[in-house]
Image (tube, rainbow, N blue to C red):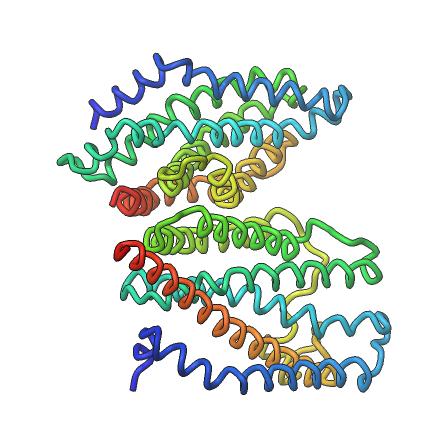
Amino acid sequence: MIALLMRDLRLAMRAGGGFGLGLAFFLIVTVMVPLSVGPQAALLGSIAPGVLWLGALLACLLSLDRLLALDWEDGSLDLLATAPLPLEAAVSVKALAHWITTGLPLVLAAPVLGVLLNLPVPGFKWVMISLLLGTPALSVIGTFGAALTVGLKRGGLLMSLLVMPLYMPTLIFGAEVARRGAIGMDIQTPLLMLAGISAASIALLPFASAAVLRINLR
Amino acid sequence: MSIWEYANPKKFITTTERVMPVLWAAAAVCIVGGLIWGFFFTGDEVRQGATVKIIYLHVPTAMLAINIWVMMLVTSLVWLVRRHHVSALAARAAAPIGMVMTLIALATGAIWGQPTWGTWWVWDPRLTSFLILFLFYLGYMALWEAIDDADTAADLTSFLCLVGSVFALLSRYAVNFWNQGLHQGASIMRVGAVIGTDTEEKVNNIYFYPLMLCILGFVLLFVALLFYRTGTEIRARRIKALLARERVMA
């Protein structure tokens, strides 16, 4: 499992900047927002938590097609499926690698981009905490979507259509934590719901992803 | 006699074709009767005037929109457990009907909302979750279309339906939490509202009976459409198999 994790991480680091690509996309989305809605500081400050969440979500989404498709093309997925390691574990490790290469950098970059968007000071902590709790769910749910569409030639757009509705609860609760935190409201309920969604997704969805992957490899 | 007999495509087609004329006729009688009763023989509501009468289209389609997804969930499970092709094809046949019902519910809701709430659209939890449901239908249908192999497509869409149901339910509660709504709560199927013991908003009896007739009509219409479309899917599958066999023979 650790070998697989290290392999995925190394591939992401070396193969054409997959590591920084999601981060750069996040930066660009964040820069585009003031350009599109105008530079008023008060307006930007009030929408900043939502924009950061949406940017992180899109960055996660767009990096999903690399998650399984490359391994599908060169046949290493077939090897993984026949390996002694259960496919459920392999899928979980792949989701973890995706999170480390995409989700974690986003969490760390969010405060910097928060400065650009004039995020209120108490918001920094909660944007980071909510992204830290929420991005693992985004990776795991995305792995399910990637497994569904792995056999398709041009599955990218279809995968977005399938994955986005599944992202909605995570986005709602995550952005709610960040928004409430930024204006100093009580955040306990959405925070617990967000943590619950993440925990349940991590625990249950790898089974669905592995089942779907087996169907596709049949 | 058990329901699994109808898992045989031939048996399914012959039986449904026998009952379909009855279903079409009953659906037409109920819908036409319910709409005429509702539109011309019930009075205008005190505050809303005649706009209240869109309820006869709005409520049945909205109920079907949700229940068709539940039906797809059940048939998907049946396909995954017992591998009956008719079941998978029924789920496939139901999805476009469900999508159209969602769309009608959203459109009639907007037309109703304009005069009563003063706006076509608000980000009310019920409205939002219907929009999300619509997106789920879109994704489900797109996945069916995208995959060539029939059994793989049936398996994958079944899994999408299972996982999607959980997340659709989660979204429902999430949007509830996210915004307070303008839309009234459940006011037809609540026990107290039907027997008239509670004093909260409820649908008056004058509107209740024609509404029930319309709901019945729409359910019958759905069943008839579902049988029709499932029969079409079965035949399309058979034509495909025949063509493939001919190609092998030649």
Q: How many marks?
A: 0
Q: Quadrant of residue A119?
A: top right
Instruction: Point out residue B60 in the picture as x, y percentages from the top left corner.
Output: 63, 72
Left or right: B160, with B142 as reference point:
left
Q: Quadrant of residue B203?
A: bottom right
Pick the residue in front: A36 or B87: B87
Residue B9 in the image: above or below residue B96:
below
In x, y percent, where is residue B229?
49, 68
Q: Residue at x 40, y 67 (%)?
A: B234
Task: Name the spot of residue B70 as percent of width and height, x first.
Answer: 47, 65
Q: Residue furthest front?
A: B250
Position of residue A180 in the picture relative to residue B48 (left or right): left
What residue appears at the point 84 percent right and 73 percent down from the top-left corner?
Answer: B50
Q: Can residue A53 be seen from the camera position used here?
A: yes
- What residue is drawn where x is 62% and y is 34%? A179
Q: Quadrant of the C terminus of chain B?
A: bottom left
